[in-house]
Structure formats: structure tokens, C-alpha cells
Amino acid sequence: MYRLVVQHEHQHQETILQSIARMENFVYEPAYGDRLPSAPLPPDTEMVVIPSGSFPMGTNRDADTYDNERPAHWVDVEAFWIDTAPVTAGQFLQFVDGGGYERREWWCDEGWTWRIEHQIKQPLGWRRSAIGWEVVEFGRPEPLVPARPVQHVCWYEARAYARSVSKRLPTEAEWEKAAAWDPEARLARRFPWGDNQPEAHHANLGAEIFGPAPVGAFPAGRSFYGCHHMVGDVWEWTASELDGYPGFEAYPYPEYSAIHFGQGHRVLRGGSWATGLSVARNTFRNWDLPERRQIFAGFRCARDA
């Protein structure tokens, strides 16, 4: 129970950072400073195929996991392709400059209505300046870094981008299989790289860098299938709505997870640069409404094999 409380506190700390990041007329100077890796390594390929077959989704082995992560259950997943890294700001910029926010055919009905109503034309925090596109975060404008994962996009924007490149968002099961499953050992890893606790060379977590790192900066953190950044940097939207697993039992109280089931929340996976180490694991399930953009969230795409 104490460990659950610690995790919940870490989640609130990230939520506070989300609020500070969007404050106007206020410049926040982080205590840690910026320590971006200086020599990022690009992923080996744009996409990788995940073979069909069953894998154990969720967990039974950790007492401090949340009720919505349990119980572990075998899920059969058809073969699919998935991006080896999150969509970058540079890739998303092509969507923006290519008229992606005006192309009705790429948006679902609810997303198009939301875009029109709020006059959305770019990710939250992006703006044009005399030197080109820049991103305002924590009151500090900085030039857009094309190699970083895009963040502050909602589920509607992520889905529209995926359709624009003839892809889709991965399901929650697809995402977890790509992150956790080791077919040679026939087991699900706790983290993409294995069962060892996260270290600085594995992932961008705990607000140590105060922003997403360039794609490919943590090769030691790859999953068995070679997927980068599946823990840390940006939360990743999935196609799935939040619901309980088969055999779900509320713990320690029903109000934590169960009241959110079936309410239209979309699941996010993987954690962000601001996520505490106690929360960062393959089975952790975050969720929010599809229009929310204040989250440190991005996405990667998938397609049928």
C-alpha cells in the first residue's frame, strides 16, 4: 500500500509539471537543467514486424501494480507492423505544413468537430516566429527540434496523422507486446530492456532532461523487437479505450480505475520524460479523454501485416 501511495504521488508531480508548462507570463527554471544526449543514434528501421501469436498481457508478479494492470492474461495478437520510434516533431511538421489540419478525410467526426470548434492548427505550444517554428514550454520559447518526439498532441491529432501516412494507432495489446514480449525466453519483460530497474542509459525519465530526447538516444533501452523509447520521453496514445481486464478486481478502492471504464478514455502507454521511475513499466496504463493535449504525450504508428 505504501508503494502505491508513492506511485500516486509521483503521478501528481507529473500533473503539476503539466500545469506549470502551460502557464502564461511565467518562466519556470527547472532545478535539473537540460542534459540532452549529444550523439543520438537513429533507429535501425522505420518499422518492424511483430509476428502473430499469444503473449501474457498485464501482470500478477508485482504487488505494487495498480488494479487495472491485473490480472495477467494471455492475448492472441495478429501480426502487425509498428514504428521503431515515436513520431518526431519533424515528421509531424510535415503533416502541419502539408495541410493536415485542413484535410477532413483524415479526421474522425468527433475529432473534426473538436478541431473546428477550438480552431486547432498545430500542436499545443507550437508557434511560428521570424526564425521558423518554435515551441513554448514552461514559458521559454525554443526552436523546434525535428529529431525529438512530438508532444502535446491529443488522440484526435495522433489518429489523423496516422491516417495521413496510411497507418493507424496500435492497440493497447499490440503496444504491450512490442514493448514487453521476449519470444526466445517465452516471458514478458517488466521493462523493454529486461527486468532491471531503469538507469540513465535506458530511458528519459524523472525530469532529468526536462523534455523529450532525440529519437535513438537510448539504444540500451530497446525492446526485444528493437523498438526505441517505449518507456520515457512521451506517453503514447493507443487506439484502445480503457476497460478492465478479464477477472478484474478493484483494489484498493473502486474509484481509482473502475469508474473510468467505458467512459471514452483512451489508453496511453510508456511514460514521459516527467514520469517517476516508480510508475515506468511496460504494464502501466494511463488514460485520458481524446481531446486532452496538456499531457506530455505523443504516439507511434502501426499497420496490419
Image (cartoon, rainbow, N blue to C red):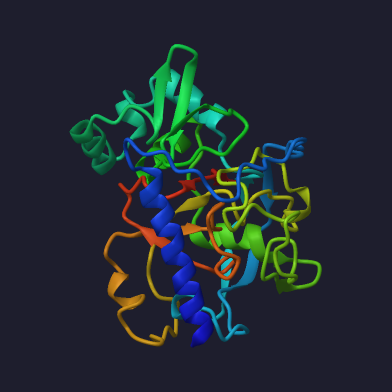
Is the residue 81 above or below the residue 280 in the image?
above
Foreground of the two, 47 or 148: 148
Q: Residue at x 51, y 45 (%)?
A: 299
Is residue 114 shown to the viewer in this render? Answer: yes
Q: Quadrant of residue 43?
A: top right
Is the residue 285 above or below the residue 268 in the image?
below
Q: Residue at x 33, y 24 (%)?
A: 103
Q: Is residue 141 left or right of residue 60?
A: left
Q: Residue at x 55, y 68 (%)?
A: 279
Q: Residue furthest top?
A: 130
Task: Residue 62: give x, y in percent of width and height.
Answer: 60, 83
Task: Residue 277: give x, y in percent of width and height.
Answer: 60, 66
Q: Residue furthest right?
A: 184
Q: Residue at x 33, y 50 (%)?
A: 290
Q: Quadrant of residue 26?
A: top left
Task: Residue 95: give x, y in percent of width and height.
Answer: 46, 25
Task: Residue 46: give x, y in percent of width and height.
Answer: 67, 37
Is the residue 276 above or below the residue 99 in the image?
below
Q: How many marks?
A: 0
Is residue 98 shown to the viewer in this render? Answer: no
Q: Is residue 246 left or right of residue 89?
A: left
